[in-house]
Structures are given as C-alpha cells and as structure tokens.
Amino acid sequence: MSTNLSANHSSEEALLDRVIRGLFLVALFLFFSALMMAFVLVLQTPAGSSISQAMNSLFALDSVQMWWYVTRAAGLTGYFLLWLSMAWGLAISTKILSPAIEGSFAYDFHEFLSLLGIGFVILHVVVLLFDRFLPFSLTETLIPFIDTYRPFWVGLGIIGFYLFLLVTVTFYMRKIIGPQAFRSIHALSLIGYLGATLHGLFAGTDSALLMTKLLYAFTFIVIVFLTAYWLVIVNLNKREKAQLAAKAAVAKRQAERMRLNQR
C-alpha cells in the first residue's frame, strides 16, 4: 500500500514539475518575444534614434547586406533544426534506431531541438523587421497571406511556424490534455513541416542554389520515409491489438462454455 502511495506521489510530483517547467518556458518565450517587439518599436520612434545610431556605429546595422545575410542564415538554420526535431521524434515513435535512441535523453533532446529551431525561426522573423533589402512590417510577419512578396508561400511559412509552436507548447501539457489529444495535435507538425518546406523552397532567395535544393530534397525524403514507416508501424500495432482482442474474446467464450458444461 505504501509503495503504491509513494509511486502515485512521485508521479504527481513529476507531472507538477513538467507543468511548471512548461509554463515557465512559455512565459519566457512570451517575455522575450514581447521584449524584441518592443525593441523594434522603440527603434522606430524618434526617442530610439540615438540607440539606433550607436548600434549602427558598433555593428554596421545600417548595412543592407548584413540583415539580409542574418535572416537567410537564421531561416535555413531554423528549418534544419525543426527538421531534425521531426526526424528525431519519428525515430522515437517508430523505434527505428532502438536502442540507440530511447530513454529520457531522447525525449529531452527532441524537446531541445524543437525549442532551438523555434528560436532561430523567431530570429529569422525579427530580423526581417530590420531588413531594408526586403522589408516586412510587424503585421506581415504575423498574419499569413497579406505581404507583397510571394504572399502565398510566405503565408504557408507563417502557418507552419504557428503549428510548430502549438505542438511545442502542448508537449508540456501532455498529462493535462490526455494522450489522444496530444497525439492528434502532434501530428500537425507534419503539416507544419510541409508548410515550412514549401515556404523555404518557393519564397527563400537561396532556393535557386544547388546546395539548398539538395538540402530540401534530402530532408523531405527522410521525413516522407519516416512518416511512411511510422504509418506502417501504427497499422501493424492496430492489427496486433485486434488479433489479441479477438483471441481473448475466443478464450473467454471457451472458458464460459467449459463452465456451463461442468454444471
């Protein structure tokens, strides 16, 4: 009895710790997002002109090429990290690399990759507000399909980012929303990844380069393979459960017949 109480207490403590950590990360993300947006707005006011001039003298922030290089590098890095998080998560689900990828470390690394990828995507978006080569307004970076530069493909990227953000947030709410809802929401990451890939391929200025095309092709093929493999595993598991349930039902009926015959 005491062992069960201790196990339940430990489980509750683990759940509480994960919820607190998740809420802290969400609050931290919102804080830094608000801080970056406030900084952008301040620089656009007369009061922020002196700050802007000081930063220009230190880092040459008034260079057109500088911001353009940063946003391109951040976008490609964020895409690669989110792809790696997707591939890692599918490898965990399918156990295709077991026992090399398993245990708490595998889940923690999956979580870390997601957060790091989202961080680079946020950097990619924020830098666009500073860029003068292809400037974006705050509303154009937040609302899909309203910008003037390839609005459809940019909008797909915005939607993909929101889906990745939703999946990452619900990762900390798994015990609250339940496993079924968590799996359903987690599957949206596939749609988010597709949106991010199409965004990079048709809206990214580096997509004409051979290396970038190879990057998108390789990453996309890996995800398609792992997704197909995952669907096969899920289907086999459902069949196995159905067969076990059918065998259990037959065994139950046979046991009932034996009891009736014994009477």
Image: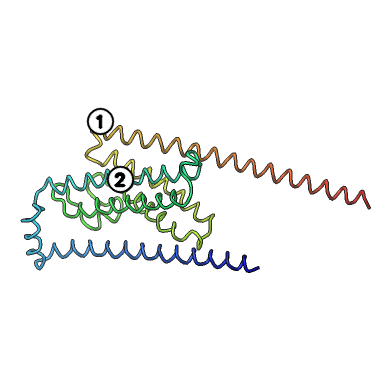
Q: How many labels does the image show?
A: 2
Near-viewer residue (127 or 119) = 119
Q: Name the residue under label 1.
A: 210
Residue 171 rendering spot, x and y as whole percentages: 44, 56
- Going by the numbered disc 2, the residue's amino acid type is Phe
Tell me which label, 2 or 1, sits earlier in the chain: 2
Q: Distance between the residues labelled 2 and 1?
A: 23 Å
**Residue at position x 34%, y 41% from top?**
197
Residue 242 rendering spot, x and y as whole percentages: 67, 44
Q: Would you say 2 lies left or right of 190 here?
A: right
Near-viewer residue (240 or 127) = 240
**Residue at position x 15%, y 49% from top?**
67
- Going by the numbered disc 1, the residue's amino acid type is Leu
In the structure shown, which secondary structural element does the residue marked by tag 1 occupy?
helix
Residue 175 rendering spot, x and y as whole percentages: 51, 61
User: Tag on residue 66?
Assistant: none
Q: Crowding at label 1, few (<14), some or many (≥20) Cα neighbours within 10 Å?
A: few
Q: In which quarter of the image is residue 28?
A: bottom left
Q: Crowding at label 2, few (<14), some or many (≥20) Cα neighbours within 10 Å?
A: some
Q: Name the residue under label 2.
A: 152
In the structure shown, which secondary structural element does the residue marked by tag 2 occupy?
helix
Q: Which of marks 2 and 1 is in front?
A: 1
Q: Would you say 193 lies left or right of 95 here?
A: left
**Residue at position x 31%, y 52% from top?**
144
Quick one: which residue is furthest to the top in this view?
210
Kindly indicate whether the residue at mark 1 contacts the one at mark 2 (C-beta within 8 angstroms): no
Q: In this view, does 197 lie above or below 130?
A: above
Task: Indicate the quadrant containing the N terminus: top left, top right, bottom left or bottom right.
Answer: bottom right
Colour scheme of this structure image?
rainbow
